[in-house]
Image (spheres, grey):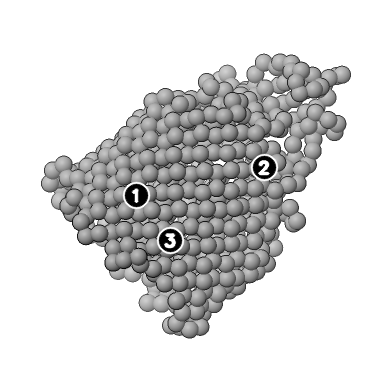
Amino acid sequence: MFWDLQDTLLEDVERIEVIRGPGATLWGANAVNGIINIITKQAKETQGGLVTAGTGTEERGFGSVRYGSKLNDDTCYRVYAKYFDRDIGVDGVDNWHVVRGGFRVDWEPANGNSLTLQGDIYDDKIGDRISVASLDDPYTQTLDGDRESSGFNLLTRWKHVISDTSDMTLQLYYDRTKQNTIILDEIRDTFDIDFQHRFLLSKRQELIWGLGYRFTCDDINNTFSMSLYPDSRDDNLFSVFVQDEIILVDDRLHLTLGSKFEHNDYTGFEIQPNARLMWTPHSRHSIWTAVSRAVRTPSRAEVDLRRNIQVFPLGSSLAVGSFIGTRDFDSEELIAYELGYRVQPMDRLSLDIAAFFNDYDNLRTREPGEPFYETSPSPPHLVIPYTSDNKMEGETYGVELAANWQALDWWRLQAAYTYLQIQLHLAGDSECILAEKIEGESPHHQISFRSSMELFRDLEFDLWVRYADNLPSQDVGSYITLDARLGWRLYKDIELSIVGQNLLDSNHPEFLSDMLATPLTEVERSVYGKITWSF
């Protein structure tokens, strides 16, 4: 997954669901610590035209165009295009340019069937500066270049409604991505098919089950710094899931049981069950608890990657420190325990508290291997390898608090606090030094406060203050950010807005890359203006 290539028009987003805890029963392997589910609007909800444009200090130029209409009474469509030119932290090196377009068609006849067809195409260029190991003196190079990405995707989804309590969905998806980078070139094709069926098993039980298959193939152009062997690979993922929602006591007690069953080409068969209980003693109070198992399966890189990290003289020869993948790496495992309480003490106020304890096993370590000599590429050199192993376990625990208060009809306040503690333990025969480093790579405390105001009928003012604790192992200090937005509806169909981001300091770091030797990128203060015209 390349997160910088996932994008859509913000105006087309219906809602974003942030789901805490493991979601492996429905989403499968690697849905270990939470899910972010972005749901876009149907084409019938985006009829007419939309034009946006803006510019600023970091958002140097951006714009989008969207148009939606009807083909007939049963069929709606929309098409869009968008562009941005962004400066993201390292002056003159990592400018980011993206052009993207796409469409969506929804067909909804009156016979209980519906069909969606949608797709996107994009071209992406982002600057990179990276230090790489070299066999030539001085044994390291700093390279500037562009990472160029392009691709397209196509999705079709058929849904058949049998009754108010039963329906089935079939979805097909294809994605092609091509990336040319300083250290690796890749072409990747992904095909995915997913089927789901929901129905009432009895008056007190609703069952949903499904089947899935995903096929991925890639073609890699290797370099000395980073390589994958074999340089072309096909991967298959088969899955079955079932989830049963059971009413134990009407309007009071609900039990959800389910599991995902998967087979992948790296670790074979994986089972990921979940049990969740919801008790609602009163319409304003609910208590829930859950126990789940989830796994993180090995990636292609952990199995097939060779990353030459460092070259240094060793007597009259050279030595190369390398991370080398292994086929002996097992899935990382999680057993999660959760407990939560939600209350609405008054109509305008809701509170949420959730506590969690996560027990991890088979966590990844990097262990030294037996050195060996290589004669190619020249000159001959000694390789000092490090490989992945599963010699660490650990626990994380914490609490999350959230409050939502509609203080006045025109003023809404939201606050959240998170506490996280990580404790990791190495096996007695491990020679890895990652445990203490990983413990210091996540903030213990995070605080968020948001204010949304409609000052007048045509004027909006939003504030967001956020605090993140320090990351001691990355030497990243704590920071406080302030974002602000002033929006003015100039006419019925035209809105102007001014946005300031990270207003409290000129720049600050938030994390370091532990995979690639890239320069520290700091988040900078920025201001931009935007105009939106809908018709």
Could you classify mark 1 by the number of other residues whose Cα lies within 10 Å: few (under 14), some (14-19), or many (20 or more)? some
Horizontal and vertical percent for residue 15?
40, 59
The residue pinned by badge 3 equals 13
Eye-nearest disc, 2 or 3: 2
Residue lying at the far left of the rendered structure: 203
Look at label 3 and name its amino acid. Val
Nearest to N terminus: mark 1 or mark 3: 3
**Mark 1 residue element:** strand
Horizontal and vertical percent for residue 165?
18, 50
Residue for point 48% across, 67% down: 66
Estimate the spatial distance between the alpha carbons at disc 1 and disc 2, rounded to whole Å: 34 Å
Q: Quadrant of residue 77?
A: bottom left
Horizontal side of 466 relative to 192 (left or right) equals right
Look at label 2 and name its amino acid. Thr
Look at label 1 and name its amino acid. Arg
**Mark 2 residue element:** loop
* Mark linked to residue 274: none
Eye-nearest disc, 1 or 3: 1
The residue pinned by badge 2 equals 181
